[in-house]
Image (cartoon, rainbow, N blue to C red):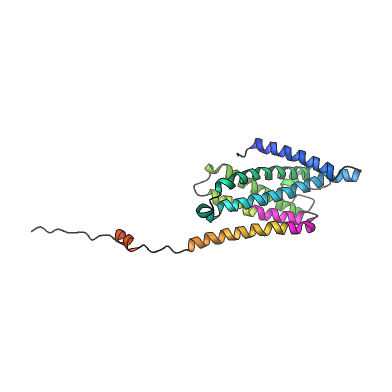
Amino acid sequence: MRVNAALLIVFGAVAALIALGVTEHVLPATDPRTDQLRPWVAARAMGVTAYLLLTLEVGLGLVLSHPRNTAEWRKTKQVFPWHEMVSVFTGAFLALHIALLAIDPYANVSVIGAFVPGFSAYRPVAVGIGSVALYALIFTAATAKWTRLLPSGWWLKVHRVAAVVFLMTWIHAVLAGTDSGALLPLYLATGLPILAGVAHRWWTARARLRRPVPAPGPAAQSIARPRPATVSVEE
């Protein structure tokens, strides 16, 4: 499955219709106050959904980039399509989350505050961290799509920014949400496994680098040992 702008628009539209339908059933506009809160509630729901999708995306990426995957697991063909597809849904729900917060007066974020760190009237530090995470995510996705533009061997190093994106997103979710206290068990249940996965991947890679190279056997030594040159003396 190829990630492109058309797919992102389609999935975004589908996600928007689902969000509107769910919001209408969960929070019907029975009074003016409820009608005012509905865009904010929908934006919050889109944000939590985008966070959960990003967690799954990063988790699948850890499986793909794990040193044991190339030698033992060999799950690239099975996992990569899911990793790519989840990235599309993550982008779609994230776009809805930002758009709803930017246009909703009740959220008190504004368009400038949603894209320029520190300009949000509502919790500027927390929202600013989310804005930086957004740009880092766009950078990661763009370099993953156009890998040929990078020098050889740089793609994987650049793609590791995804771990930083997840960390900033986690901090943004905890600090920005008014319901962060109620959702803290969810954030811990999703953040700790990703942290453990990053640590295990790093530990495995370091262990492989430190693993001593076995000494060559007698046969290999005889092949590798240079033979003395023979000198013929003519009388």
Query: Where 62 falls versus 82 (above or below)?
Result: below
**Residue 101 occupies which quadrant of the picture?**
top right
Is 166 left, or right, of 228 in this rendering? right
Query: 158 or 113, which is in the foreground?
Result: 158
Q: Position of residue 110 (x, y in %)?
A: 78, 45
Left/right placement of residue 196 relative to residue 184 reads: left
Identify the residue shown where x is 69% and y is 56%: 190
Of 211 and 47, which appears nearest the observer?
211
> Magenta region: which residues?
165-186
**What is the magenta segment's predominant secondary structure?**
helix
Q: Position of residue 155 (x, y in %)?
A: 54, 48
Residue occupying the point 73% across, 40% down? 15
**Residue in view at x 58 percent, y 53 percent:** 63
Which quadrant of the rendered structure holds the N terminus? top right
Give the farthest residue toward the right: 31
Q: Is residue 229 magenta?
A: no
Residue 94 place in picture, x, y as percent: 71, 45
What residue is shown at x 68% (from left), y 45% (from top)? Answer: 90
Q: Residue furthest left?
A: 235
Count of residue discs: 0
Seen from the viewer's position, the closer of residues 114 and 233 is: 233
Q: Is residue 69 visible?
A: yes
Where is residue 127? Give x, y as percent.
74, 51
Q: Split into 4 quadrants, where in the image is the C terminus?
A: bottom left
The answer to whether residue 110 is seen in the rendering is: no
